[in-house]
Image (cartoon, rainbow, N blue to C red):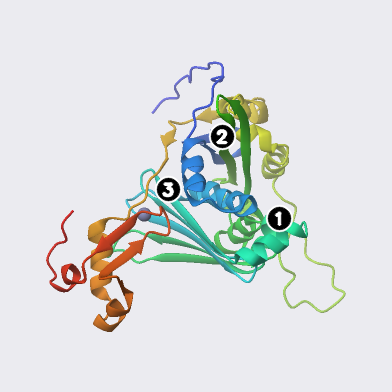
Amino acid sequence: MSDMAIPTRSPAPISADDTIQPFEVAALDLRGRVVRLGPAVDEILGRHDYPAPVAKLLGEALVLTALLGSSLKLTGRFILQTQTDGPVRMLVVDFATPDRLRACATFDRARVDAAIAAGKASPGSLMGRGHLAMTIDQGPDMSRYQGLVALEGGTLEDAAHEYFHRSEQIPTRVRLAVAEEFRQGGNGVRHRWRAGGILLQFLPKSPERMRQADLDPGDAPEGTAPHTVPEDDAWVEGRSLISTVEDIELIDPAVSTERLLYRLFHERGVRVFRSAPVHAECSCSRHGVASMLRSFSQDDRDHMVENGKISVTCEFCSANYVFDPGEIESGEPPAA
Ligand SMILES: [Zn+2]
């Protein structure tokens, strides 16, 4: 195939919300994605009504999940889950191909309130120590893949860097940003959540160029100078460019994704690919909840009956499903 001239045009001024924009900087062997979340993140976080620092943390997890999950080539789910000892014990974000996001957090309200009062409600302090698991589930015929990384009181960005460094050995940088936007409207001040993020990876054709600087010195005798390897110049350049990205550039609708990419990489030439939409949608259903209840023991189901009904609320979207116990026991498909 002969080279084709790629037409150049000015970057689009307006950013499209709820999109994932893949890009490539061929001259530096860099690839990446930019995620912008408007109504999707506002719907998910707004429905839960968590304390603001918890919502912000879950928003970061949503952005990270969209950045990573959108790389799935086949039909399936990408699930990001934290389990930690801090006030926020668990975050679960679920990306179902091609475009559905849902998320929820489990936290101790008294400990969260105490952390806020003490000024210690940063994402890292809210999570504390534990681990972050990333699961790829592509259906019953495919093996599940799970990657694990320790959370040591740092941010989700730190954990993502650690994961790609240790497990995938791909030089990677991630930036995540979440903010509440306040607007004066007809009925007073209205607030909306917005979020955005960028992922950058160094993927040269020759793997030896992927060397990374901070390798563990291993069991070398104490006092031995660590074996430092210089990073590839292309990656050093990419890494330093992405470190200049400000939160506002990832959130502000007035700064389009294309303008941000142009600001970062125009000297090297950046190419954008077709963007993909994402939206907030839960995968729960009356049928699915009924099947789950049927998988429980009779005894467990009996304990769930209150006022003659079994009521189940979805943790992700707060949808409430109410059944007659007989409806579950008969095994008949429940009425819609
Ligand atoms: Zn649901």
Residue 282 lies left or right of residue 151; in this view the side is left
Q: Find residue 180 and report its horizontal and vertical position in percent.
A: 62, 39
Image coordinates of residue 170 in percent, x first then y, are 58, 54
Q: Which residue is mark 1?
A: 122
Asked whether disc 1 touches disc 3, contact meaning CB atoms under 8 Å apart, the reply is no
Depth check, mark 1 against mark 2: the one in front is: 1
- Viewer-nearest residue: 153 or 47: 47
The residue mark sitting in front, 1 or 3, is 1
Among the 4 quarters of the image, the one containing residue 77: bottom left
Tag nearer the camera, 2 or 3: 3
Where residue 253 appears, x then y in whole percent?
A: 58, 27
- The answer to whether any part of residue 131 appears in the image is yes
Q: Residue furthest front?
A: 307
Looking at this rendering, what residue extends furthest in the right direction?
223
Q: Gap in Å between the C-alphas at discs 1 and 3?
A: 24 Å
x 74%, y 78%: residue: 219
The answer to which of 145 and 90 lies nearer the viewer is 90
Whether residue 20 appears in this view of the structure is no
Farthest residue in the bottom direction?
299
Q: Which residue is mark 2?
A: 26
Disc 2 secondary structure class: helix
- Name the foreground residue: 57 vs 68: 57
Q: Amino acid at mark 1?
A: Ser
Residue at 28% in and 83% down: 299
What's the CA distance linking mark 1 and mark 2?
37 Å
**Mark 1 or 2, nearer chain start:** 2
Q: Is mark 2 within 8 Å of ligand 1?
A: no
User: Within 10 Å of the Cα at label 3, are there few (<14), some (14-19), or many (20+) other Cα atoms?
Assistant: many
Residue that mark 3 sits on: 101
